[in-house]
Image (cartoon, grey):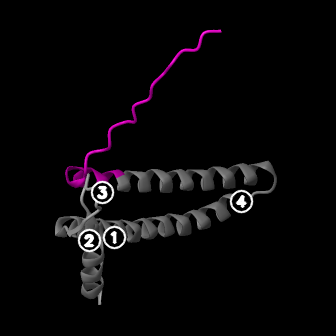
Amino acid sequence: MLAVFGIVVVVLTSRVGQKGDPNETEIWNWKVGGLTLASFLVGATTSIISGYIGMMVAVYANARTTVCAVPDGPVGWKGAFNCAFRAGAVTGFSLCGLAITIRKPLLPFSPPPPPPPHHHHSRQSR
């Protein structure tokens, strides 16, 4: 089933317009379709890994936060807050690190960024 989905994605994303063509003629560019499919699969895999990491940290953090909240008063509030805050930080940093780790090897396959827009700055005299 995944292979059929992959074929459909490649076919649907391979029909692209030519740059600079005033008639907007569309051509089949299988490289674009293949890179789109590869990007989708890498993103889906990264999402699965991120979800697993996030859920594992959340489950352990819930149990630890509950234990830290047992003491009455400010001690319990402070302990529970610190535990939950640290768990959120661990999740955030680990997912950002995963994203950077996955994205870095894909950079050579990415198209170059577009040039910045050219703005004319004029000074108005008062």
Numbered disc in front, either 2 or 4: 2
Looking at the rendering, which quadrant does residue 63 occupy?
bottom right
Q: What residue is at 58 percent from the left and 14 percent from the top?
A: 124
Q: Describe the element under mark 4 as helix, strand or loop.
A: loop
The span shown in magenta is 100-126
Q: Give whichever of discs 1 and 4 has the lower sequence position.
A: 1
User: Which residue, given by chain and number where applicable, does mark 1 sit on?
Assistant: 45
Which residue type carries mark 4?
Ala
Q: Given the current orientation, which residue lies at the most extreme right position? A: 73
User: Which residue, given by chain and number where applicable, does mark 3 sit on?
Assistant: 102
Q: CA distance from mark 2 to mark 4?
A: 57 Å
User: Which residue, given by chain and number where applicable, does mark 4 sit on?
Assistant: 69
Q: What residue is at 30 percent from the left and 66 percent from the top?
A: 42
Left or right? Give the position of 48 relative to 21: right
Looking at the rendering, which quadrant does residue 17 occupy?
bottom left
Question: Dot 4: within a 10 Å radius of its alpha carbon, few (fewer than 14), some, or many (20 or more) residues?
Answer: some
Left or right? Give the position of 27 relative to 82: left
Contact? badges 2 and 4 (CB < 8 Å)? no
If the image is split into quadrants, where does the C terminus sit? top right
